[in-house]
């Protein structure tokens, strides 16, 4: 086996690189054609999804194959080879089989356990078969991968470890809440009518949205998808199709939009989304401390800043009769004009004088200058008792360490509150359909491939995942053994064919030497000679198949050909005949 896979995925490359390297259907066809035309590759298949691009090939030389496949990926993706190379991974022989089986089971997916990858593998095989780029190796490999994936989903609870990207994306839009409760009654816009968009539309219909509008560049496909949604027995959703030109108008009505097209440019720009939500976003709620509903009685951040800039009349230390020299103290690190337990480096005597002034000059919500009339306390001053306690605590610290440590609290930073989203966007396309700048728009919640990757990065592995990994390991071993055993079969067949020719030649020579031999005796002699040959070949051929099935057993076929001086062309002819028979017997993927 000389199976080689070269590719990149969400595990090896950032979304920005995957986005640029994405291959449309035409590019995939051209890549397959150029790969099988290249010298090192005899077969080829492309697996291209929203988060991976992989090129599988049967090659006769490892290093030349890696170089050729990497170059072809770079040429057809439009990303330079030097830029692409750091993100490429390479798997060979058994490791390549293990990788594809893991992918088929959802172990390598962005959302572990998702089952949509099986359909994508099936499509990949069908494309390679249609273009006749898949021979016996890749046909067997991809069909076995499909069987392994189905086994993993039927024998384990891998489905509980994850779900499709559509479901996971909707859960992210709902912030982890119940998707059905979140979606109930909403109006949905689905852009695109391919497999992913169709899955999204069906999922939204089952979740209970009230209406689904399907937009697609080919209007007939949009109409067909809308009809399918309306005909569904398990949903009661209103669905209709619109041309792509109607997307801006439909966006103003939609509550949730899912986009997954094959477009090479943006389908929704930040400007078009901003126009769609204009006039729909509710006014931001009042921020505490800014006047308006919900404001507190204390000074806001802006008011506090004004007090710091003009301290007069806003602090205990600014009142007439205060013993502190404000012009000197305000330059000290840690000083707060709001009197919040706040003086660093002040002499203890000054501190005690300040405390006495507070005790004598402040009571009952009024402040009294020395010898002057009582007047209301200035806004922003602290309660006298609390201020006195704070000063007493600082005085105790001075007695211990000699100086007052800085204890000023940082002023709270008021953060503007974003309004609740009125438009939810799910972008499942690669490259992206929706401008990433939409993330910054108020009233919009966007979930795309990049944010899905971040959300799923820390997902815990379930026990079912370990069980699936064991299934994959067992299946890889079985596939490798079967493949190696099949590799030696043409040699064994050629050996037995040669032995049969030798028997036939010797019987013919016997007829020439004994022309009077009757048919009964000739048949007995022929059967005896054949039994002798079969017994001599039985043990070696059975044993060589067993040895060839083990890792590193490929050399036994070469040894057999050398020992019996078998014609390589005879062996190749047997292989071609077997492949032709297998191709006729092979059913659909």
Image (cartoon, helix red, strand yellow):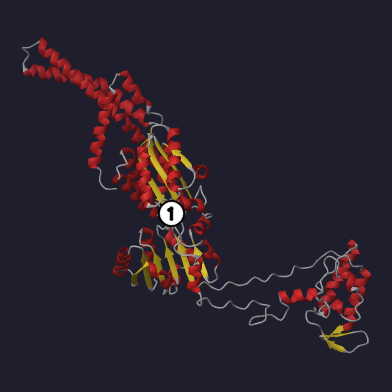
In the image, residue 555 sits, relative to residue 506, either above or below, namely below
Residue 36 vs 238, above or below: the answer is: above
What x and y, as percent, mark residue 104? 39, 48
Which quadrant of the view contains residue 519?
A: top left
Residue occupying image coordinates x 25% and y 40%: 583
Q: x, y (%) of residue 334?
A: 82, 66
Q: Position of residue 24 (x, y in %)?
A: 39, 52
Quarter of the figure with residue 483: top left
* Horizontal side, residue 401 vs residue 23: left or right: right
Q: Is residue 278 visible?
A: yes
Q: Could you tell whether 173 is left or right of 349 in the image?
A: left
- At x 11%, y 20%, the residue is 523
Residue located beneath label 1 in the image: 50
Camera-nearest residue between 545 and 80: 80
User: Which residue is more in the foreground, 287 or 254?
Assistant: 254
**Drawn side of residue 9 relative to residue 378, left or right:** left
Determine the secondary structure under disc 1.
loop
Residue 509, x across and y down, in percent: 14, 13
């Amino acid at each position: 086996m000389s199976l080689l896979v070269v590719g990149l995925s969400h595990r090896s490359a950032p979304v920005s690189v995957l986005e640029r390297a994405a291959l449309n259907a035409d590019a995939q066809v051209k890549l397959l054609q150029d790969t099988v035309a290249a010298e090192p590759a005899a077969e080829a298949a492309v697996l291209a999804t929203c988060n991976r691009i992989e090129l599988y090939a049967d090659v006769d030389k490892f290093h030349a194959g890696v170089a050729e496949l990497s170059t072809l990926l770079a040429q057809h993706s439009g990303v330079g080879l030097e830029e692409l190379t750091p993100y490429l991974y390479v798997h060979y022989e058994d490791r390549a089989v293990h990788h594809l089986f893991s992918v088929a089971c959802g172990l390598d997916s962005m959302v572990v356990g998702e089952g949509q990858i099986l359909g994508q593998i099936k499509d990949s095989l069908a494309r390679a078969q249609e273009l006749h780029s898949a021979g016996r190796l890749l046909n067997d490999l991809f069909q076995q991968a499909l069987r392994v994936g189905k086994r993993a989903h039927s024998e384990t609870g891998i489905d509980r470890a994850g779900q499709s990207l559509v479901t996971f994306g909707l859960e992210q839009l709902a912030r982890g809440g119940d998707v059905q409760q979140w979606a109930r009654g909403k109006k949905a816009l689905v852009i695109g009518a391919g497999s992913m968009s169709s899955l999204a539309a069906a999922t939204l219909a089952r979740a209970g949205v009230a209406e689904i509008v399907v937009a697609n560049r080919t209007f007939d496909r949009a109409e067909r998808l809308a009809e399918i949604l309306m005909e569904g027995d398990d949903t009661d959703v209103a669905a209709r199709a619109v041309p792509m030109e109607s997307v801006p108008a439909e966006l103003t009505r939609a509550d949730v939009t899912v986009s997954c097209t094959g477009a090479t440019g943006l389908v929704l720009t930040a400007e078009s989304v901003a126009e769609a939500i204009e006039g729909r976003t509710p006014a931001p709620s009042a921020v505490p401390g800014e006047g308006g509903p919900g404001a507190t009685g204390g000074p806001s951040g802006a008011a506090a800043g004004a007090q710091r800039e003009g301290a007069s009349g806003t602090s205990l230390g600014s009142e007439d009769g205060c013993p502190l020299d404000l012009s000197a103290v305000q330059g000290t690190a840690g000083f707060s004009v709001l009197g919040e337990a706040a003086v660093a480096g002040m002499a203890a005597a000054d501190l005690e004088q300040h405390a006495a002034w507070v005790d004598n000059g402040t009571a009952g919500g009024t402040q009294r200058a020395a010898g002057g009339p009582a007047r209301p306390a200035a806004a922003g001053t602290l309660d006298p008792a609390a201020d006195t306690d704070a000063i007493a605590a600082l005085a105790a610290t001075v007695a211990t360490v000699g100086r007052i440590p800085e204890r000023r609290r940082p002023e709270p930073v008021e953060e503007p509150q974003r309004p609740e989203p009125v438009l939810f966007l799910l972008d499942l396309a690669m490259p992206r359909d929706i401008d990433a700048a939409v993330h910054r728009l108020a009233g919009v919640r966007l979930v795309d491939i990049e944010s899905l990757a971040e959300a799923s990065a820390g997902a815990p592995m379930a026990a079912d995942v370990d069980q699936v990994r064991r299934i994959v390991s067992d299946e890889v071993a079985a596939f490798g053994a079967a493949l190696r055993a099949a590799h030696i079969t043409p040699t064994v067949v050629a050996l037995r064919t040669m032995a049969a020719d030798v028997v036939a030649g010797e019987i013919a020579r016997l007829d020439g030497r004994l022309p009077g031999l009757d048919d009964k005796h000739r048949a007995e002699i022929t059967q005896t000679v054949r039994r002798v040959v079969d017994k001599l070949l039985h043990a070696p051929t059975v044993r060589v198949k067993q040895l060839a099935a083990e890792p590193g057993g490929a050399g036994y076929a070469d040894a057999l050909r050398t020992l019996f001086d078998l014609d390589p062309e005879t062996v190749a002819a047997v292989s071609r005949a077997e492949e032709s028979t297998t191709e006729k017997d092979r059913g659909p993927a």
